[in-house]
Image (tube, rainbow, N blue to C red):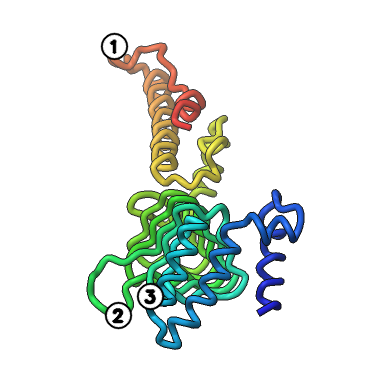
């Protein structure tokens, strides 16, 4: 028991730069209190003292604002930061070294008995306000963006964001950024690391529009060299300001 408590305290120092002392962590961190109460409640639950286990969980929720069902399985070195509004369902499983922020829900989508809550594998990070619903699996080392609503499995090491949550394609961003730099601007200069696929989609459209604009300008130049007169509608001084558009999108 004391070895686990020591791990819990060290984890806070690792993941929260605001932590200053062991005494402060033990007395003022609701995430620590909720985990300690859950360990007692889980033992009672497994020993078939169901009502007492639920009552301890109820008291812990009243004090910490974190609701963990006694039937949930929580691994070692799990850190619940801030914690207010966290809800963890009966059949949820949280692996070692996971981190949950305030407002996270590990909920169910069915009233049927059996497995109906998520499984978080080792090292998963769940951002504030995220909802993970149903008996799905979040792969080891995956990250769930703040306020995301996850209703499908997330692969190992992936990042999921949005409503409903989508997996970010980080590999696609690299060639797009190289193309943008060749054109004299960076479509991802500000939001390259933003976990928002909709914003990245808009940047991609701006990037594509810039490439198309460059091609049309080249075609018009070649037509003029051949003596062709471009239509009046093509004669305009308007410039496509990709940098400005990217700025207002961000």
What distance separates the C-alpha of mark 3 from that of mark 1?
A: 68 Å
Report the residue marked by disc 3: 91
Q: Is residue 182 visible?
A: no
Q: Residues within 10 Å of mark 3 (few under 14, many from 20)?
A: many
Farthest bottom residue? 47
Residue 114, labelled with which disc?
2
Question: What residue is shown at x 58% (from left), y 70% (from top)?
Answer: 36
What distance separates the C-alpha of mark 1 from that of mark 2?
A: 70 Å
- In the rendered image, residue 198, in percent from the top left (x then y), is placed at 39, 42
- In the rendered image, residue 227, in percent from the top left (x then y), is placed at 36, 16
Question: What residue is shown at x 48% (from left), y 47% (from top)?
Answer: 195
Question: Residue 222, relative to residue 91: is it above or below?
Answer: above
Report the residue marked by disc 1: 232
Farthest right residue? 21
Tell me, yes or no, whether the two marked residues, 2 and 3, touch with CB atoms within 8 Å.
yes
Where is the N terminus found, in terms of image quarters? bottom right
Q: Is residue 190 visible?
A: yes
Q: Nearer the viewer, residue 172 or 107?
A: 107
What distance separates the C-alpha of mark 2 from that of mark 3?
A: 8 Å
Horizontal side, residue 197 vs residue 234: left or right = right
- In the rendered image, residue 172, in percent from the top left (x then y), is placed at 48, 52
Q: For numbered disc 3, what is the local secondary structure? A: loop
Q: For numbered disc 1, what is the local secondary structure? A: helix
The total number of labels drawn is 3
Q: Nearer the viewer, residue 108 or 139?
A: 108
Q: For numbered disc 2, what is the local secondary structure? A: loop
Horizontal side, residue 37 vs residue 16: left or right = left
Horizontal side, residue 206 vs residue 34: left or right = left
Mark closest to the chain's N terminus, 3 or 1: 3
Tell which tag, 1 or 2, sits nearer the viewer: 2
């Amino acid at each position: 028991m004391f070895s686990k408590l020591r791990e819990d305290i060290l984890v806070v120092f690792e993941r929260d730069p605001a932590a200053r002392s062991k005494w402060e962590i033990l007395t003022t961190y609701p995430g620590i209190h909720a985990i300690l109460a859950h360990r007692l409640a889980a033992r009672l639950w497994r020993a078939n003292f169901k009502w007492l286990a639920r009552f301890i969980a109820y008291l812990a929720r009243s004090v910490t604002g974190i609701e963990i069902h006694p039937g949930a399985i929580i691994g070692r070195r799990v850190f619940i930061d801030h914690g207010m509004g966290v809800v963890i369902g009966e059949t949820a499983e949280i692996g070692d070294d996971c981190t949950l922020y305030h407002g996270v829900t590990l909920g169910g989508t069915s009233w049927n008995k059996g497995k109906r809550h998520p499984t978080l594998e080792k090292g998963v990070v769940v951002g504030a306000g995220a909802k993970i619903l149903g008996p799905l699996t979040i792969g080891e080392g995956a990250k769930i963006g703040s306020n995301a609503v996850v209703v499908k499995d997330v692969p190992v090491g992936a990042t999921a964001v949005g409503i409903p949550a989508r997996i970010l394609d980080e590999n696609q961003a690299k060639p797009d950024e190289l193309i943008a730099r060749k054109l004299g601007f960076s479509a991802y200069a500000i939001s390259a690391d933003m976990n928002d696929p909709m914003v990245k989609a808009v940047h991609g459209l701006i990037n594509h529009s810039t490439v198309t604009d460059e091609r049309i300008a080249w075609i018009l130049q070649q037509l003029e060299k051949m003596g062709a007169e471009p239509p009046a509608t093509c004669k305009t001084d308007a410039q496509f300001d990709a940098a400005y558009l990217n700025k207002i999108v961000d």
